[in-house]
Image: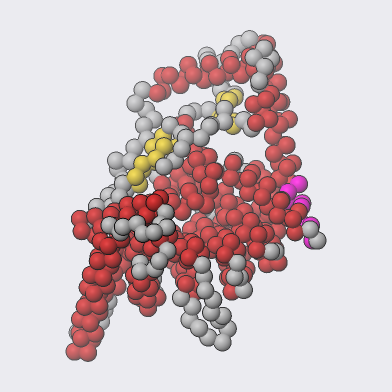
Amino acid sequence: MGKRSSQRKKVTLGDSDDDDSLSSSSTSRSEVMLSQGIEDVQPDKESSLDQALDALYEKRMATTRERALSSIIEAFSSSLQHLFVEKKFATLLHQCLNSIKRGSAKETSLASHAIGLLALTVGHGENAHEILDESVLPISQALKSSFESSKVSGLVECLAIVTFIGANDPEETERSMQIMWQLLHPKLGSNVVSRKLSADVIAVVVSAWSFLLTTMDGWKLNPKNWQESISYLSNMLDKDDRSVRIAAGEALALIFEVGSLEKFFVEPKGLGDNSIHEENTQRGGLAHLQGLKGKFLNQVRNLSTEAGGKGSVKKDLNSQRNLFRDVLEFLEGGYCPETSMKIGGDSLSTSKWSQLIQLNFLKRFLGGGFVKHMQENEFLHEVFDFTPKRKHLSGSEHHLSSGEKRMYKSPNSVVNKARTQLLNKQRMLSQGRNAGHYAVGFGDEEP
């Protein structure tokens, strides 16, 4: 899990310590040239994003807007576009929302992904809440009229990301969870159209619902919806598709981890003496709870040892067995699966179902940009209590683009010589700070 990606080079500029500063006048001139070179290259990034944003105003050519959205997604995945967002946040958001309202299935899916990346870039705060406020209604309306799998999946994942980051209270989170749940188990009425979702979409919706559940206290969920979801997820374990079984198994394991089954059936405070009818109702609820637990445990045992049938994919079968062996160990012994992955030279560990579900969802959403965001995205550092060692280094850092790297390709250039001197200086300064000073620790996390 988590292949090490190539890291872009970095250069440290402008230390203020007079004793350590480089005194050569030629070096000073080279530093200026180095800074000017960086400034010359940096606008190219913004320029390409500006062009892509302008292309979203194209009314007739959907392919033009789709290409523009793909470019925006690539830029936001491969680098944190804070400067661009600072200038064009509102414009980008509303152009993407226009694509969701009026675009094709492909355009809607791309725009949804772009909005999710925008939310991940801004992190917690007023902008993230604005994204949620502005997006919920268009996404909800688009889901009611959408039947294409890619479109529904894109909209649901976007709703999950913007809610995870932008929700200020449990009610906002539960609102998004209910929008998702209506796709799985609609309450039919005059304004609701029944439809059959593909197995892939069902798995995406359940995973997104679980992703948001990781942020909730079981007591704060609507009891009727909560009870219904447990039974429905249990039934999903009997479905033919393994991706659906895995998503449902993770959701149920999470429910057991947060203790919501037990909390739901505990007598609410302030009722005083119960009547005989209330006592019988509570006993019936507890009996129903035990029945659900027994059914779930038997399902988990069977799925953890399922034999591969004709035409079964070995990778999918192994994923299912491994997942349900972890669930079984958790149910019988209370042990959550522990995972560890490398992010550059640092380790990112999980020890709870909630953490594992969050990690897997964000990995899928970010794709090839996951490592980059884990290294540099402050919001994700907070979510996973993860601090890359390089974040402890003092001084400012600048991460070079491919264009900037080409600038220093010649070893004899004045700029490259200055860069070498600066890096050597930084290396010397950091040597005294390395000994036992910047270790990444997860031992203080609660089990």
Which residue lies at the image location 45% right of the left edge and 44% below the top edge? 381
**Residue 216: in magenta span:** no
Asked which quadrant contains residue 216, the reply is: bottom left
Q: Where is residue 56 in the image (x, y as percent from the top left)?
A: 74, 55
Residue at the outermost right position: 60
Q: Position of residue 258 (x, y in %)?
A: 31, 61
Q: Can residue 214 be seen in this view?
A: no
Q: Where is residue 340 in the image (x, y as percent from the top left)?
A: 36, 41
Asked which quadrant contains residue 419, the reply is: top right
Asked which quadrant contains residue 41, the reply is: top right
**Residue 57: in magenta span:** yes
Q: Nearer the viewer, residue 327 or 90?
A: 327
Q: Is residue 166 above or below residue 147?
A: above
Which residue lies at the image location 53% right of the left edge and 47% below the top edge? 367
Is 188 positioned to the left or the right of 93 in the image? left
Which residue lies at the image location 33% right of the left edge and 41% below the top edge? 442
Quadrant that contains the N terminus: top left
Is 61 positioned to the left or the right of 340 in the image? right
- Write down the region rendered in magenta: 51-59
Q: How is the image coloured?
A: secondary structure
Is 347 positioned to the left or the right of 279 in the image? right
Q: Nearer the viewer, residue 94 or 406?
A: 406
Q: Where is residue 278 in the image (x, y as percent from the top left)?
A: 23, 86
Is 223 positioned to the left or the right of 206 in the image? left
Q: In this view, does 417 lie above or below 117?
A: above
Q: Is residue 174 visible?
A: yes
Which residue lies at the image location 36% right of the left edge and 72% below the top edge? 235
Count of marks, rendered view: 0
Q: Which of 408 and 393 is in front in this view?
A: 408
